[in-house]
Amino acid sequence: MSGVGDPVSFMRRTFSLEFKKSGSEEWAGPCPWCAGTDRFHVWKRGNYMCRPGPGHCGKSGWLDELDGTKPSSEEQRLEWRVAALERQVKEHDERLSTLERMAKCTDHLAYHRNLQANDQALDYWLGEGLYLQTIDRFNLGYCPSCPTYPPSPSFTIPVTYNGRLYNIRHRLQYPKAGSKYRPHMVGLPAMLFNADDLKAKDARRLLVVEGEKKAMIVSQETTLPVVGTMGKQSFKPEWASKAQRFAEVVVCYDPDATEQATATATLFGRRGRVMILPMKADDFFTLGGGGVDEFLYAVKVARPAA
């Protein structure tokens, strides 16, 4: 720990700001400068960072260097908020344009035809534990050169809702360090995969898993409505309202993401549950030899998020 002592007490004493725990040795709260509500993080060892983004300053450093530092003026914060609003409007317009182009795109159908003519690419999907009918159902495919990362071929996953194409997720065959997936076009927003299952009737539970492949595996092995997020931190709070029909929403992320799973399940209030498995949901069926009854029991006994 740095010379400032407790980081939370330091922020309260220096800037009159309250912080909440967001990790084992991490707290989050308002930024003293750009007035963000929860993007300013402090750590036990004494460092801080305002997560960069539209309307956020991105400052970082050490708390013990902030003694005597004053927060930004209200005028400066107003300027930042106006600039942030202008950027958001511009980004919104650009995103709408990209989504409109995506809706007219038929590349996913060409990629699916590629797969049918390429035994090695088909073997990849089969090797991941997907059945032929699942591959056809989700129009999985193969792209010789990913549009947003041309050095690598990719295995493709269309993301659709209500018959409209919102993205094609490209799982790189030769991924760049730290990133296995690429979007079909730059600027596309995060989406829930298999979101049509949100309309499932006569279903008591919805399952939320981490990733498209896990959603497809669970969907082919069980009758549970299931949606997949694009990573363990991509679930948007506004999506929770789309699951009102379900009495329980069970979140099953990877074994190392229980904290993120709990945060997502909390968005559903008393209906939120966290499901604990000793391995990833797809590995449970494809590598662990788990059965459907065993999996459904784990869903049934999922613990409340609280």
Image: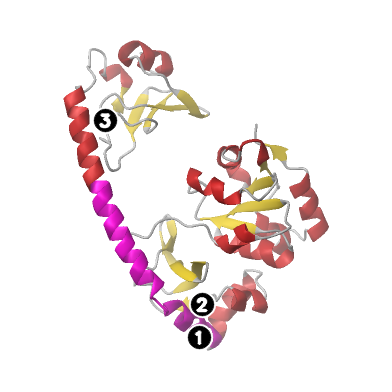
Helix, strand or loop at label 1? It is helix
Indicate which disc residue 34 carries: 3
Tell me where residue 50 appears, x and y as whole percent: 32, 33
Q: Which of marks 1 and 3 is nearer the N terminus?
A: 3
Helix, strand or loop at label 2? It is strand
Indicate which disc residue 141 carries: 2
Report the residue at 43% width, 64% height from top: 175
Residue 110 inside the magenta-drawn segment: yes
Q: Earlier in the sequence, mark 2 or mark 3?
A: 3
Indicate which disc residue 113 carries: 1
Identify the image quadrant of residue 139: bottom right
**What colouring style does the render use?**
secondary structure
Report if the CB atoms under discs 2 and 1 are less than 8 Å apart.
yes
- Residue at the extreme right of the image, as rendered: 293
Name the side, left or right, on which 218 lies relative to 165: right
Name the side, left or right, on which 230 lies relative to 207: left
Depth check: give the residue in front, 147 or 299: 299
